Amino acid sequence: MEKKNKPLRQCPRGSGKPSWREVVIALAMAIRELSKLIQLYIMN
């Protein structure tokens, strides 16, 4: 995941509404954080 400094919004038609790629990336990051929290909760 070294492409964070690259702007995600590259297609001009996605004005105002986030593109599906941004939504997918945000969902993946949220799921990863949730799985980390669940693992910590289970381990303790």
Image: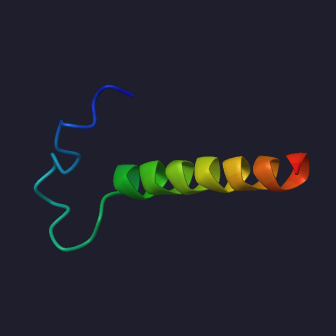
Residue in view at x 55 percent, y 57 percent = 30
Q: Is residue 5 left or right of residue 32?
A: left
* The one of 5 and 23 positioned closer to us in this rendering: 5
Residue 21 picture location, percent across and down: 38, 49
Residue in view at x 18 percent, y 36 percent = 6
Up/down of 17 relative to 26, above or below: below
**Residue 13 occupies quadrant:** bottom left
Furthest residue in direction bottom, as rendered: 16
Colour convention of the picture:
rainbow
* The one of 14 and 44 positioned closer to us in this rendering: 44
Residue 15 picture location, percent across and down: 15, 68
State which quarter of the image contains the N terminus: top left
Furthest residue in direction left, as rendered: 12
Residue 16 picture location, percent across and down: 18, 74
Q: Is residue 31 left or right of residue 38?
A: left
Q: Is residue 41 left or right of residue 13?
A: right
Residue in view at x 89 percent, y 51 percent = 42
Up/down of 28 relative to 30, above or below: above
Residue 27 picture location, percent across and down: 53, 56
Residue in view at x 36 percent, y 54 percent = 22
